[in-house]
Image (cartoon, coloured by chain):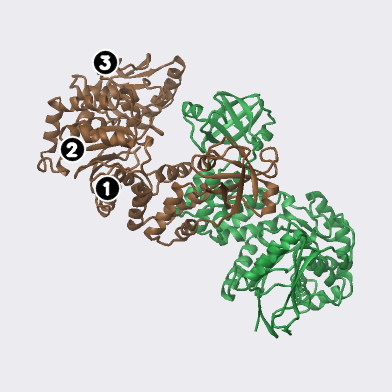
Chain colours: A green, B brown
Amino acid sequence: MNFKVKDLDIASGGIMVVVVNQEDAINLDLHHGDRVGIIYGKKHAHVIIDIAESKKTIPLGEIGLFEEVLDHLGVKKGKKVKLVLEEKPISVHYIKEKLKGKKLEAYKIHEIVKDIVAGRLSNIELTYFVAGSFARKLSSKETVALTKAMIDTGETLKVRSKIIVDKHCTGGVAGNRTTMIVVPIIAAAGLKMPKTSSRAITSPAGTADTMEVLTPVNTSKERMEKIVSNINGCIMWGGAMNLAPADDKIIKVERPLRIDAEGQMLASILAKKGSVGATHVLIDIPIGKETKIHNLRKAKHLGKRFVDIGKKLGMKVNYMTSNGNEPIGNGIGPALEAKDVLKVLQRSDSRPFDLERKSVMMAGRILEMAGKCNKGKGIELAQSILDSGKAGQKMKEIIKAQGGKIVKSSDIRVGRETYDLVADKSGKIKDIENHIISNVARFAGAPADKGAGLYLHVHEGDKVKKGDKILTIHADSKEKLKFAKKVLFSNKGVLIK
Amino acid sequence: MNFKVKDLDIASGGIMVVVVNQEDAINLDLHHGDRVGIIYGKKHAHVIIDIAESKKTIPLGEIGLFEEVLDHLGVKKGKKVKLVLEEKPISVHYIKEKLKGKKLEAYKIHEIVKDIVAGRLSNIELTYFVAGSFARKLSSKETVALTKAMIDTGETLKVRSKIIVDKHCTGGVAGNRTTMIVVPIIAAAGLKMPKTSSRAITSPAGTADTMEVLTPVNTSKERMEKIVSNINGCIMWGGAMNLAPADDKIIKVERPLRIDAEGQMLASILAKKGSVGATHVLIDIPIGKETKIHNLRKAKHLGKRFVDIGKKLGMKVNYMTSNGNEPIGNGIGPALEAKDVLKVLQRSDSRPFDLERKSVMMAGRILEMAGKCNKGKGIELAQSILDSGKAGQKMKEIIKAQGGKIVKSSDIRVGRETYDLVADKSGKIKDIENHIISNVARFAGAPADKGAGLYLHVHEGDKVKKGDKILTIHADSKEKLKFAKKVLFSNKGVLIK
C-alpha cells in the first residue's frame, strides 16, 4: 500500500512512530500499537502505528511520520512510501513472560534491550518490562544480563589500561561534590579515571552542572579517550555520549510512578561503569532520613548486591556508607559548589573540611583497591597528593584539556541578589535538612542559573550566637530571591536548639 | 505563567495532553509526564505534560493543546491561558501499591477508574495498573470493586423491570451468531433483553457488524431504553453508548501485550452487563484448541468465578460450556451470517441446524433461569417460540424499531466474486479450523466489506465425495478474492480423511 508522506514536525524522543488516518486504519485492519514497515527506496523502517481520529491531521492516503522515521529513511514530505505489515518483535513476547513471573535467559534480555535502543518498543511495552522487573524482581543472573545488554547496545570507551577506576554515589545529599576532588587525586596518582557524570534532575546541581562552571563538559567519545590517555582523568557529562542508551529510555517510563526496582537500578549504574571500561568501582551509599537508603541494614544489603553483580561482570566493586543526614560542603548550586571544590584543591583556609575529609577517604579507598598502596595507607596517600598541590595541578590540566580557562575560586561569579538568614537565638545547630536546602536553592534558580543557590555558614553541631549568619541565599533576580525566601520560611530548614 | 495556545489538531483518544517547548520545560522544571493545570477564564483542565524537542512544533512561550483539552476549556488558538503546577493524582500512588503486591480497597480502585475515565492518567500509568492487576492478580473483592467502579463511572441503562436478562460468549468460534436468535426468542417470551454487542476486532464479524446488515445499530441510551420498554429487546452496538467507558481504555493498553488478566476480564464483561441493568446473565464458554479456554477444567474454573463475582454484584450468573472446535452456522462474514440468522428465524429448509440447536439451548437456559418455565422445560419452550414464528415476528419488530427495513434472507447481497473449494478426494470431514476460516474471511474483506466472507457447505463429520463443494469464498473484488484464496491454500483449513 502506497502513502504520501506528511512531515509531522514532532519527535517522539526515540520511538519510531507513524500516524495513519482512522479510515485507512480500518481498511487495512491496523490498530494503535501495531507494527508496520515503511519502505522508501532501499531504506526500511520498523515503526509503530498511531491513529489520527481527524482527517485534518492526516488526510486519507497520507501518513504522518515522526522526526525519527523521517531521519532514518531520509525522506521528505510529499514523497511516496510503501507501508507493509510486520509482526510484533519477539521481545514483546519475552516481556510478557517476565510479567508472568518467568526468569528470562540472557539472550531474551538482550533482545528486549536491543529493541528498546532501536525504538522498536512502544512506551506501553517498555512500561510492561519495567513493571515486570519491579513486580517480579530481577534475579542476579537477570541483572547481570541486563547490565551486559545495556553496555553492548551502546558505545563503549576504549582506554588502554589494565586498571580503570570509577565511583558512584547513590545520592540524596546536597553539595557532596566529591567527584571533582577524587578524580584529580586519583589521576595525579597515575590511575586512569574517565569520569562521566549526570546533570541535576531534581537536585540544585549535578556534578556535570558544577564542572561546567569551570570548563565545557560536552565531548565526543574519541576526544574523551584521548584526554584520559594523555592526562589520566576527565569529568564529562555522560548524556553527551551514547553510553548505555537503553538506561535513559527506561528511566523515562520509571519516572511517572517513581519506580525504584533494585535490579534495574543496579544494572543502570553498573552499565554506565562498564561502558567506560571500569575495572575498579567504589560505591558511596549515604544513609539518612531523606536519602534513598534509610538505615545501615538496607545499605549493607544494597552494597553487597553491588559487589556481587560487579563480580559476575568481572568488575571489582567496593562500597562504603556515609552520613547522609546533612549537606556536604558549604555551597549549594553549581557555582557555589565549584567554589568549594577549588578552595579544597587550591588549599584555601576557608575550604569546607567535611567535603575534603570525605573526598580524601574515598580517594584513599580507591587507591587501596587499585593496589597503589597498602591497606590502611590510602587516606594518607590521598591526603599527601592533595596537600602537595598535585591534585590542584591535575585539575588545571583537566580543565584545560576539556577546553576551559583556569580561574581562582574567588573569580567565580555567584548570584548578586542575596539574603542572609541569621540565628534568632543562641544555641547549637541541630538539623539541616537536605530536602529543604535543595528546594531553596532550586527556587533561587539553580541549576539553570549557575550562580544561584545558597551558602551554609554552619554545619550540624556548630554553636551559634543570636545574630550569627546561618546561610546566605544567592539569586540572579529579586523575584527568584523572593521565591527562595518564601520556601525557606515556610519550611524551617535549619533547626537551632 | 501565561502561554499562547497552539491548536495541535491531534486527539490523544482520551488522555488530556499539553505539549511544552523543551526550553520552557527546563525553565519551569517540567518533565515528560508531569501534571499541570491549564486555566482559561473560569475553566480548569488537569493535563499531562509532553515535551517538544524542536521549536518548529511549539515556539517558546506557546503551548500545544490536544483536541480533548481544547474542547474541555472551550479555547481557540492564539488565546492566552495560564499554566499552574499540580500534584500527581493520588490514584498513581494506589497503582504503585498494587504493583508492589498490596490488595487495594474499593475506594482506591474507584479513584483509579475515575481518573482513567477522566483522562487524568497517562498511558504509562494506566499500563502499570494493568501490569499490576496481571502480575499480582485481582482478588474477588478487588474484581467486584473494579466492576462496580466501571459501572459507576459510565452511563447506565434504565429499564423498568424486575428481571433483565443478558448473555455473553467468551468467543473464538467463527459464525456463532446465537445472540440474534436468542434475543428475539427471549423478547417474544416476555422478558426484557437490552443487548449491546461489539464489533469485530480480530474476527471477520462481531454481532454488531452482522446486525448492521439488517438495521442500524448506533443509538442513544434514551432511545434504547424506549425500544426495550416497548418491545422487550434490541441488539445495539455497545460502543456508541458511554457504558463502562473505562473498559475501552484498559483494553487499549492490554492489546500490545495481549494481556488477559482474569480479574480484569471478569470485571470488563460483568461491568457491561451491570451497565444495562442485567439481573440474569448466561455465559457461554466454548472449549476448543483455538478458543481462549482449551479444556473443561479451565472452563469450569472460569465459569465458577463468573458465578461468584456475579453473586457479589447481586447478579444471577449461570454458565455453560460448548463445543468450540469448529465454526457454528454456514456463513462467515457479516452478510453471510445475517442470512443464516434470518433462515433460522424464518424457518427456511436450508437453515443451519447447529446454529439453531445452540441458540435454542441457550434461550432455554435463560428462560429457566428467569423462572419462565420449570427446570428442564426451557429448550422445549424456546423451540416452540421459534417454531411458531413468534421469534421471527419479534425480530421484525426489533429491526423496524432500530430503523431498518424488513428483508428476506435471499435479498441479502453477498460478495459477487466467488471461488468454490471442492473436495480433492472422497472421505469424511475431519477438521475445520476456526482460525484459518476466520483469516480467509478477513482477507476476502470482512468485516469492512459486509458481503465478504465464506459459506461452509459441510461440517465436521459430514461425508463428501470427490468434487463436492466444501466452501465458497465471497469477495467484492477479484484482488481480495485472490488474497483470500492464497490464505486458504497456504493453510489447509479443512481436513478430509
How far apart are labels 1 and 2 at the CA level?
Answer: 24 Å
Residue A230 lies, with reference to residue A82, above or below; the image says below
Residue that label 2 marks? B191
Labels 2 and 3 within one chain: yes
Front label number (1 vs 2): 2
Residue that label 3 marks? B410
Q: Are the two marked residues, 1 and 2, in contact with CB atoms closer than 8 angstroms?
A: no
- For mark 2, name the chain: B
Displayed quadrant of residue A359: bottom right
Foreground: B82 or B321?
A: B82
Q: Residue at x 36, y 27 (%)?
A: B437
Q: Position of residue A427 (x, y in %)?
A: 69, 86
Of callouts 2 and 3, the N-terminal one: 2
- For mark 3, name the chain: B
Foreground: B65 or B72?
A: B72
How far apart are labels 2 and 3 at the CA level?
Answer: 30 Å
